[in-house]
Image: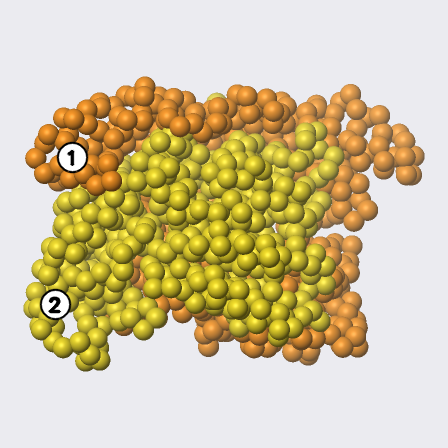
Chain colours: A orange, B yellow
Amino acid sequence: MKHEDSSWCCYQLSLYRSPTNRVGVCKQEMLQKKNAVLVDGVILNGPIMDSKAGEKFVEDACKIIMEEVVQKADDITEKVCEWQAPEKLKQILDLEMRDTGECDQKVLQLCRDVIKYSVKTNHPRFFNQLYAGIDYYSLVARFITEALNPSVYTYEVSPVFLLVEEAVIKKMIEFIGWEEGDGIFNPGGSVSNMYAMNLARYKFCPEIKEKGLSGLPRLVLFASEECHYSMKKAASFLGIGTENVYFIKTDERGKMIPEELEKQVQRARKEGSAPFLVCATAGTTVLGAFDPLDKIADICEKHGLWFHVDASWGGSALISRKHRRLLHGIHRADSVAWNPHKMLLAGIQCCALLVKDNTGLLKKCYSAEAAYLFQQDKFYNVSYDTGDKSIQCSRRPDAFKFWLMWKALGTVGLEERVNRALALARYLVEEIKKREGFQLLLEPEYANVCFWYIPPSLRKMEDGPEFWQKLHQVAPIIKERMMKKGSMMLGYQPHWGKVNFFRQVVISPQVSREDMDFLLDEIELLAKDL
Amino acid sequence: MKHEDSSWCCYQLSLYRSPTNRVGVCKQEMLQKKNAVLVDGVILNGPIMDSKAGEKFVEDACKIIMEEVVQKADDITEKVCEWQAPEKLKQILDLEMRDTGECDQKVLQLCRDVIKYSVKTNHPRFFNQLYAGIDYYSLVARFITEALNPSVYTYEVSPVFLLVEEAVIKKMIEFIGWEEGDGIFNPGGSVSNMYAMNLARYKFCPEIKEKGLSGLPRLVLFASEECHYSMKKAASFLGIGTENVYFIKTDERGKMIPEELEKQVQRARKEGSAPFLVCATAGTTVLGAFDPLDKIADICEKHGLWFHVDASWGGSALISRKHRRLLHGIHRADSVAWNPHKMLLAGIQCCALLVKDNTGLLKKCYSAEAAYLFQQDKFYNVSYDTGDKSIQCSRRPDAFKFWLMWKALGTVGLEERVNRALALARYLVEEIKKREGFQLLLEPEYANVCFWYIPPSLRKMEDGPEFWQKLHQVAPIIKERMMKKGSMMLGYQPHWGKVNFFRQVVISPQVSREDMDFLLDEIELLAKDL
């Protein structure tokens, strides 16, 4: 049953929706109806929204989304992107927000344009970032989330999503190899690393929560040279300072050298500073390297340092019986960041910070005990009101999309996804070795395949500064050409003195061997005149 | 055109989807096909996903979402919540994630259950939080976001969403009254306040980014007693310390008293600490109070303090020509937090931190210049790669949902929404005054209507500690009853020595006068024996 007085609903809309596809009713007519209540010039009878028209709009839009995004997700004849330069795209899209609204037909056209000019990150040939592809189950979970519009802080307003988060965290903890623990989903690996850093600091000196860092010795933390840039962002944001991140040298494969870590910890102690945290990386962003966790754990134990593992990218290998050895020793970590939105396709964002402690450290560190939200005299067990563990107030139910996907695919299905991505990366590596003009940076251990393409004109040049300088310019040119053609997307970057090289990331289950072959063929084609 | 080799797709699924509704193909058969490529035991031909079945699943699920959520959003005969205690709900929902997946029919049933037992935050009688209702345009934008799965950091991967964010920020700045400025969408008002605090600190002493707070004088910031609890969370997280938030007394309406601020700034100076920031609140969480921005701006100017306005809740009044006077003086702020996901229904989360500075302060403060993401040798103008202003790496395109809604409704439509919500609140206040047993805490100036319900048995009691002690227990009982009945949801809390009272928040355009009357009738009904 709808509101009895729903005939009121269209009037106000008609005021500002012109031209409109909805039927307006004149104000005078409305006021003549019985029970009309006018406050501050606003008629308060009945709802203001025309729900039938709204539902129709949602249905029409869903049809467009199905046709233009979902059904095209595995269509390799579609473009990955429809490139337009910023100034041109501004002209094409009608960005201006005006006093009067647009009719639904115009808004639907806007939706089409937004889709058309957006990069298709679920296209089988989108290899540009550490996420790609489409998972139908997680997608449905995300649609449900948006329709229900929940915020996860109290059991009272998010009963299902709080229980789901608890179950997912428990399961992730099981895969890390802890007997118990705690955790919280949050908006990204960067934020997860911040959570861990603050938690380690709290454990080191709980008084910092109230007193702050002023007057304390300089806190120092350690991470490899190859760690994610969020370590610097976190150190700056948390008032620790980027200079107090001591970067540890890595070996030729990008892994932290434990002996170098030991040296730096001793150096920090000698300087009179206060080392408190080591951040190892399981799956570095560029090279996909895994730090030797077990050896790093030894050093942390020896020096009493919090051991955090940033497994935002590599954590998903824990699901694979074949590949979880990459993270050998992770069970010794005090905290772990793990993003199922990357390798496992849970959708941006789906990131957990997991903590081994089970004495309520997370809550003690983060709680502010807002009385208006976390009332203690509720009629249910308020230990389910977990929102006070968060730095956020409103929080999205990101665990839910991972949960629904896991329910549908099973652990074995998730494992299959990881195994396949890594087998495809392995296939690509072997193909690269066979082809003239392609050169691997290093043998990868994960899904990051880093390589140079040496175009025909450079193949006979002598090795030397001029060669590398010229090679440095090749990847950006190829990238520009592939973007403008829209045939695929692939990242490049310089790295620690190495000139621009491609980083190919294999994730999506929509991808096959044929796409790997295409990638190499296409680079050759795009660069044949270089 | 789909992948040529798509006949391969079903094999691996059949391994672990049992019982399954999809046709499996035996491995032997697959391997006999031409070109079979097997790496590490994984067949790499064709995609692993059965996209037709996946699309069918999404379509079936969308039907459920339309019927069970979207079409019921304005149906007052539906329950707001289907209450179950945590232990019982765990039994009902099959939370366990297993090795093998469930068939699509089972997953669809799970979706139904998730919806059934979730709180309907878009129900016309959900008054529990600072968000409510449904907006069909923002909902569609959110569905598009989920389908496209973008991350907003570089123009290359998010061309449309970066331009949209730029346009929305520009428009919000216009409504604040600044001539120019900068900003970033981020996951919540709490995080926005953190951004502002760190930015103010950076402006105060840029070296903190590299050096940290160690060895510096104690930084002190000021906020009213009524400010959001995120101020404490932020001070703790940023290493400033909760004790260094000096809470300023408020008047009887919950507004910061400027003279008290002046005193506290002077006290901080005398103590030798370093005051750097004043956080005013425009729309406090419980009372909906607006601090006197213009007078606070005078004090900030006088003392050279950064002036931040937490307008997470109240910012939307800027859209209303009638009500924007509540924020008089906001144009003098250095930064503003504003959440369109609250009063304007943009969907959780949609929150901007806006900054008056236009010299690149935001970028200077937050950048880490990751070479793998923010390459400087791209073929387009890299000033559009705005992701380095963020504390996040992956970031959702939250501006987009606000933009699409604004396009559809126009400024006048958004204004209408604010005016109507405040008119409904005004109507409720007048009704409360008329009814026996209801008592207002204070005359509200925004959409928060705070009141006690005094049940029959307490009406003749003498005013005194016993009366208030008994009254304190009333709201939790009524709340329990309304939750178990599922007829509506309404928050309560104690506050600064005042015993438990209800906080009614009016937002949704689906709400009408009839719902206000119902609210009061229902409280009377639920509490008639108390």
A60 or B166, nearer to the observer = B166
**Residue A418, percent from left and from top:** 54, 49
Q: Which residue is mark 1?
A: A6
Question: Residue visible at 68% across and 64% down?
Answer: B212
Q: Is residue B292 left or right of residue A272?
A: left
- Amino acid under disc 1: Ser
Chain name for mark 1: A
Q: Is residue B378 left or right of residue B136?
A: right
**Residue B258, percent from left and from top:** 47, 61
B91 or A84, nearer to the observer = A84
Mark 1 closeness class: few <14, some 14–19, many ≥20 residues within 10 Å: some
**Residue B368, percent from left and from top:** 68, 50
Q: Are marks 2 and 1 in contact (CB under 8 Å)?
A: no
A159 or A66, nearer to the observer = A159
Do we see residue A64 in this rendering? no
Image vertical order of residue B441 relative to residue B81, above or below: below
- Amino acid under disc 2: Pro
Q: Which residue is mark 2?
A: B455
